[in-house]
Image: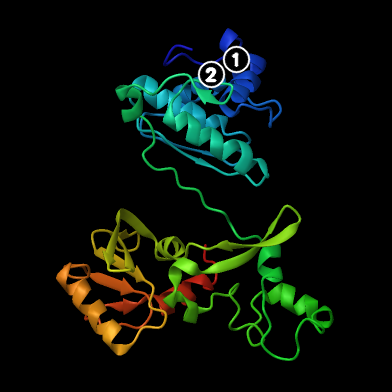
Amino acid sequence: MPEGKKPKTVWYGSGYSATTYGTKLLNDILGSHDFSYPKSVFLMIDCLRMWLSENSTVVDYFAGSGTTGHAVINLNREDGGQRKFILVEMGDYFDTVLLPRIKKVTYTPEWRNGKPRREATDEEAESSPRVIKYIRMESYEDALDGIEFDDNLGRMNLEDRIQDYLLKYMLKWETQNSQTLLNVENLGSPFDYRLRAHVNGGDRERNADVAETFNYLLGLNVRTRRVHYDGDTRYIVYRGETRESPGREVVVIWRDTKGWTVEDHELDRRFVAEHILADGYDTAYVNSPSCIAGTKPVEPIFHARMFAPVTA
């Protein structure tokens, strides 16, 4: 469809065939038939071309097989645009269809029977996504099922008080150390934090990315994420600025401090100082207790914002 042309109510075109450019195209990408009736990628490209500028962000709350994301990638390759996409999907085919599709078309645009027909050209690679981030939201049922009780009340009295618990959600006393409600003591091991979740009708433990969660709670616009090593100790350092205070530099430092001694904390302080990880910033956060001068602990901010009331 020509750029700038007012669209008609009904669109016709050979590239709009859902059979050829929807189902068959997706089958060629995945190498199997795992999704019925996907939209034509060329239909979505024309939709995006008609209404989006080259730097727009498109949000698809019913992402299905990921055709919208695929179309954004192809359109950027076509005209050198910098469009971004946010896809939301709750179906199980997120893992089997949507995510594999986006990964594959990011690598190269042409597929046959699940295998690449060629590598991307330099121009195509330059216009391809550099980072694809996906987030799995904890469901309400996951949260309730993941609650752990510390006292003798246990689950036996839950039904008698279910209405109160469902309304309050946070079970203050019996569950204050539950992983579901953020056990701040365990943020000393941020890379091993796990939550239970419903998967295919059963419960399964999954890693929770508490560092990334904290960025969202803080409203941090991340500019860089770097990994440093001091022997076997891994440091993940985020730098950026918050939406609340644009222009103010923020750094967040994460490392595993489980079992650390006083000597370990002193070595930690020296390493951070030698590598200038916390200097030159308006605010510096660090997880778990530390002796790093000028830093604030992550835990109080994390807990306060995790359970802060929603404001309009």
In which quarter of the view is residue 251 placed?
bottom left
Type of residue at label 1? Tyr
Q: Is residue 158 left or right of residue 300?
A: right
Vertically, is 282 above or below 99?
below
Along the line of sight, which residue is nearer the eye, 157 or 309? 157
Q: Is residue 234 left or right of residue 66?
A: left
Q: Residues within 10 Å of mark 1 (few under 14, many from 20)?
A: some
- The residue tagged 1 is 16
Vertically, is 8 above or below 296?
above
Type of residue at label 2? Phe
- The residue tagged 2 is 42
Q: Residue furthest bottom?
A: 152
Q: Residue furthest front?
A: 231
Q: Residues within 10 Å of mark 2 (few under 14, many from 20)?
A: many
Residue found 41% across the figure and 83% down from its top: 259
- Tell me where residue 107 appears, x and y as whole percent: 43, 31
Residue found 63% across the figure and 14% down from its top: 20
Determine if residue 13 is in view. no
In which quarter of the view is residue 44 placed?
top right
| 2 and 1 marks in contact (CB < 8 Å) | yes
Q: Residue furthest top?
A: 14
